[in-house]
Image (cartoon, grey):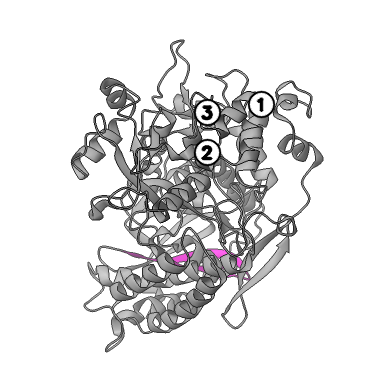
């Protein structure tokens, strides 16, 4: 293979992924005067960001003037069970309001309060109404606004292009080997910096809200390049995905349904979430002792309903009802907003949900309840980055959005994902620009390294026979669904690692029939490599963490354990190519941030904790 004959494209910086994080990173890089390219595995506008429907969390105080960055930071840390990177949670809480207002300047059309301010709704884990929203289509509006702004900034978009391997020069990023999905032709991107914004790896599970693109590509590319992964045991199962019909099982039902008054019922018609309110949560959240006691006693009318507990609590509650035989006919629970709100309100505030159930499940949610259940939704863990710049341990390699780790800790609060994208997308762009300005000589792509990357990619096409990639993907989903699901134990996780080792041997001999042009079987074969790395990392981390914290639940180690609080799991690639897990102590947080996170809410709101900065 002659590398000189391969199509070559040069940019100062290359963004891998065209969701909210990738687009915001690209806009910032272009604003910094860099030649900026964006590659997208799918079509522009097809990003997973559009599925984040409920809103973006920012302490703007438009609905509740008592809200501020410190309360938002406190909510985020407590929702993340103090496993968050403190600096990332601080940056997010402080900068999110400016990023939302910036989107408005770029054309985003938000719902408004009666006084004309950006409206904000309640969401799980947030003390105050904090989610700026556009009905239940907020992610779509975010993508639209970023795309409309970005296309005028001189950014080059390369759609239906998949990254294969990072090319390095003396340890630094020098380029990316990639291929066009339609023609199967290879393309070499020469670049001084790469920003990964590739999302998570939900397709390792069968019941997931994630679309076909989410195969952990960014995690695998970073891992193979020598970057560190962390916190991958924390995989969030969103409590409300569609459960019927089977063709749409797992598709997201926005938390906005519960934020706008929807309640969860079991097959007996009981509103069961009152039975799952943690006493500590009630004591911390209620405004008065009476409200906390009423909540725990199942008295309706609390300021924040139990359906808006954090996602891990709600998902486990639905699972518990199912195991107790009180689930809905198709294996979930009933989400009822019809009895709580009139039809006009539902159609106005939740238009996407109304049409989704009408068209896909033949259910009119203005009259009947929805059947919902837990669905693998989001990766809190991912690529380890430096908080302010978003650079990984590989010089010139950055990551932002869902594929990066640290912001959300053990459990992400609803709405923090969209504001995460725009806050850290911008910071990664600034970080890449600063890195490039500090470069001496430009990194050079090595020809042999490039040839090896492309030869590896064509191996499934050149084998005489081998395993079917679709069958192997089914096997992977069986393993992860049965043994690395919402509730875990040592026996299942150990067995899962054995199963994954056996499956890995099959993946090494996977066969894709036909030529490289228009060949989805080849795409699936290449994706299996990424999914195997992702699945093994999740399982190793889950086995290592012997406690239940946030989205990670171990039935053999119930409850949070103090000896695990200061530690995290990190994953690296060993010299022999095997995956290495290391238990690493987290750095001690700054005193001001620790005081805010652990403060009494009354003292915080009264300004008695920390200087207002």
Pick the residue in front: 119 or 281: 281
Q: Which image quarter holds the N terminus?
A: bottom left
Which badge, 3 or 1, is on the more N-terminal residue?
A: 1
Q: Is residue 355 above or below residue 1?
A: above
Q: Which residue is the site of mark 2?
A: 309
The residues bearing labels 3 and 1 have C-alpha atoms spaced at a distance of: 14 Å
Pick the residue in front: 602 or 183: 602
Q: Is residue 279 above or below residue 377?
A: above
Q: Secondary structure at mark 1?
A: helix
- Is the C-beta separation of discs 2 and 1 under 8 Å? no
Q: Which residue is the site of mark 1?
A: 289
Q: Quadrant of residue 524?
A: bottom left
- Residue 304 is tagged as 3
Q: Quadrant of residue 465?
A: bottom left
Q: Residue furthest top?
A: 115
Pick the residue in front: 37 or 508: 508
Q: Is residue 168 magenta?
A: yes
| x and y percentages locating residue 226 in the rendered image | 59, 69
Pick the residue in front: 113 or 3: 113
Q: Is residue 359 above or below residue 392?
A: above
Instruction: Give the residues in magenta.
Output: 163-180
Left or right of 245, for residue 506: right
- Is the C-beta separation of discs 3 and 1 under 8 Å? no
Which badge, 3 or 2, is on the more N-terminal residue?
A: 3
Q: Which image quarter holds the C terminus?
A: top right
- Is the C-beta separation of discs 3 and 2 under 8 Å? no
Q: Of discs 3 and 1, which sits in the foreground?
A: 1
The reply to whether residue 47 is visible in this rendering is no
| x and y percentages locating residue 575 in the rendered image | 62, 80
Left or right of 558, for residue 591: right
Left or right of 378, for residue 82: right
- Residue 539 is tagged as none
């Amino acid at each position: 293979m002659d590398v000189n004959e391969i199509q070559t494209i040069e940019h100062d910086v290359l963004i891998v992924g065209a969701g909210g994080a990738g687009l915001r990173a690209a806009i910032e890089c272009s604003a910094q005067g860099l030649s900026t390219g964006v590659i997208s595995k799918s079509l522009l506008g097809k990003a997973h960001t559009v599925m984040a429907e409920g809103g973006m969390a920012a302490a703007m105080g438009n609905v509740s003037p008592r809200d501020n960055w410190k309360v938002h930071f406190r909510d985020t840390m407590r929702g993340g069970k103090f496993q968050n990177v403190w600096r990332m949670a601080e940056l997010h809480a402080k900068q999110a309001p400016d990023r939302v207002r910036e989107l408005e300047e770029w054309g985003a059309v938000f719902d408004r309060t009666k006084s004309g301010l950006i409206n904000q709704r309640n969401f799980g884990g947030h003390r105050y109404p904090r989610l700026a929203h556009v009905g239940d289509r907020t992610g779509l509006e975010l993508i639209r606004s970023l795309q409309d702004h970005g296309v005028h900034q001189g950014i080059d978009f390369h759609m239906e292009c998949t990254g294969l391997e990072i090319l390095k020069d003396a340890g630094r990023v020098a380029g990316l080997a990639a291929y066009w999905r339609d023609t199967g032709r290879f393309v070499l991107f020469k670049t001084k910096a790469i920003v990964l914004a590739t999302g998570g790896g939900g397709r390792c599970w069968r019941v997931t809200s994630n679309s076909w693109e989410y195969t952990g590509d960014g995690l695998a590319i970073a891992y193979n390049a020598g970057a560190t992964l962390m916190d991958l045991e924390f995989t969030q199962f969103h409590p409300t995905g569609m459960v019927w019909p089977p063709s749409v099982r797992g598709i997201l039902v926005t938390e906005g349904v519960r934020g706008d008054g929807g309640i969860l019922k079991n097959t007996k018609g009981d509103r069961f979430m009152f039975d799952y309110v943690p006493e500590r949560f009630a004591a911390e959240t209620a405004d008065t002792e009476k409200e906390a006691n009423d909540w725990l006693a199942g008295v309706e009318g609390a300021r924040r309903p139990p359906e808006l507990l954090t996602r891990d609590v709600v998902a486990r509650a639905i699972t518990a009802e199912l195991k107790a035989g009180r689930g809905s006919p198709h294996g979930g629970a009933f989400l009822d907003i019809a009895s709580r709100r009139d039809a006009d309100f539902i159609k106005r505030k939740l238009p996407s949900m109304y049409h989704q159930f009408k068209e896909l499940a033949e259910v009119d949610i203005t009259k009947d309840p929805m059947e919902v259940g837990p669905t693998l939704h989001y990766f809190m863990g991912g690529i380890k980055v430096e908080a302010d710049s978003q650079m990984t341990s590989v010089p010139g390699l950055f990551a932002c959005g869902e594929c990066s780790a640290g912001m959300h800790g053990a459990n992400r609060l609803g709405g923090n994902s969209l504001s995460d994208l725009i806050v850290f997308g911008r910071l990664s762009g600034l970080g890449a620009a600063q890195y490039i300005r500090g470069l001496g000589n430009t990194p050079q792509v090595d020809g042999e390294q490039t040839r090896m990357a492309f030869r590896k990619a064509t191996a499934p096409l050149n084998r005489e026979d081998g395993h079917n990639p679709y069958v192997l993907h089914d096997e992977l989903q069986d393993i992860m669904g049965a043994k690395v699901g919402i509730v875990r134990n040592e026996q299942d996780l150990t067995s899962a690692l054995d199963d994954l080792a056996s499956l890995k041997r099959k993946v090494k001999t996977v066969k894709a029939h036909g030529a490289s042009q228009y060949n989805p079987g080849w795409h699936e074969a290449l994706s299996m490599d990424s999914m195997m790395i992702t699945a093994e990392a999740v399982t190793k981390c889950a086995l290592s963490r012997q406690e239940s914290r946030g989205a990670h639940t171990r039935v053999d180690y119930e409850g949070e354990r103090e000896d695990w609080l200061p530690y995290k799991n990190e994953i690296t690639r060993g010299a022999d190519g095997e995956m290495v897990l290391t238990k690493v102590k987290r750095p001690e947080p700054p005193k001001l941030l620790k005081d805010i996170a652990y403060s009494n809410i009354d003292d915080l709101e009264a300004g008695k904790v920390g200087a207002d900065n």
